[in-house]
Amino acid sequence: ASHTLLKHEGISTASHPTKHLVVSNGGLGNGVSRESLLEVLKEGGTVESLLTPPAKPYAFVTYSSTEAGQNAYTLLNGRALQCHDQSVTLYFSYVEKVDSDRSVSCALPPGLSVLEGFVSPEEELQLLQAVDWTPHTADVTVQKALKHRRVKHYGYEFRYDNNNIDKDKPLAGGLPAECDALLQRCLADGHISVLPDQLTVNQYQSGQGIPPHVDTHSAFEDPILSLSLGAKTVMDFKHPDGRSVAVVLPERSLLVMKGESRYLWTHGITPRKFDVVPVSEVEGSGVMTSDLSNLTLKRRGTRTSLTFRKIRHIPCNCAYPSVCDSQLLSSPPTVPVAEGDACR
Ligand code: AKG
């Protein structure tokens, strides 16, 4: 286990007892909640701090003394822990210190904002009811059950085979009238300067997600809006240089992806049943806290998102030519520019 920790995670373990231990298999990324881990850890002695890095299969615990650390090791190493619907075996190793730099990035990608409470609970209900999932024969909307979620398109169909839209084939009916008020608010508040003409509704059951992608530059203008309804989720943003930011999207919040966050960073939702969220939940939106002692798991509910986009009619000339299909011409892009579902 020590070898694996060093090789894959850069964690060097100590061969002598200390007050700090790394708990392999005891991490949020392994489906272990902070609360259940803490309950077990307390059997070993007084816990000074517990760090639960997001998406990692391990946690770090610091006891009040080396004796307590040693006691915990003897008592708890190899302990089976039942968490949600699985059993995991906890393995402990001593470490010299807990590196508090093992944190997630705190800054939102440039151009990204999350507007909490953008719609009221009443509007949320109305919008959810406006989406009629019964199959239609008329071609006013297009809906599909994808491998990872179900989708419905208004205004124009988004084609997952070429990650684009047929600009000369608008769907009859346009966007649902129930969206008018919130779109007018977006205009009035300056989040958009023209009304969107394409809407994709995604519905994710717990455990479903969407692969990381950049919305095709040549297909849509800037910005892109996404309204979260029914349940919160965590959306992962990734920069081509490897930086990664996990952003909590609470129910009824509006995500505005503009500029760099729209053109350069991929966005996606990892399919999982639980999300790593701040313990208190009061933080609500924004970037996952860098305080790793304050994260836990929360079961995902069914989330319906409304993604509003404006069709682009002239080639994109953004400031990110390396990922811009309009500017790349025939050479392939260096990051996924797709909805990510083309090969499903
Ligand atoms: C898409 O449909 O391309 C999305 O990225 C959906 C995002 C969301 O669910 O908020």
Image (cartoon, rainbow, N blue to C red):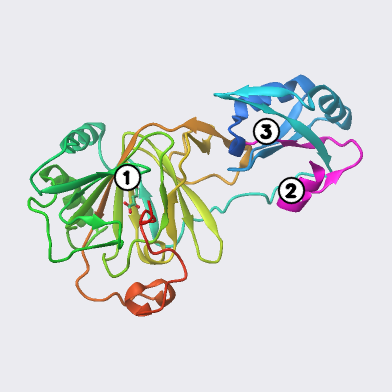
Query: Residue 173 magenta-drawn?
Result: no
Q: Check contact, mark 3 vs mark 2: CB within 8 A.
A: no
Answer above or below: position of 52 versus 107: above
Q: Secondary structure at mark 3?
A: loop
Q: Which residues make up the magenta segment?
A: 1-27
Q: Residue at x 74, y 48 (%)?
A: 99
Q: CA distance from mark 3 to mark 1?
A: 33 Å
**x 83%, y 28%: residue:** 73
The disc placed on residue 266 is none
Disc 1 residue crowd, few under 14, some 14–19, many 20+, Cα 10 Å: few
Q: Which residue, given by chain and number where applicable, does mark 1 sit on?
A: 146
Looking at the image, which residue is at 13% across and 66% down? 168
Q: Between disc 3 and disc 2, whose residue precedes?
A: 3
Q: Are marks 3 and 1 in contact (CB under 8 Å)?
A: no
Is 278 on the left or on the right of 174, as rendered?
A: right
- The correct choice, above or below, for 272 with respect to 171 in the image is above
Q: Which residue is mark 2?
A: 99
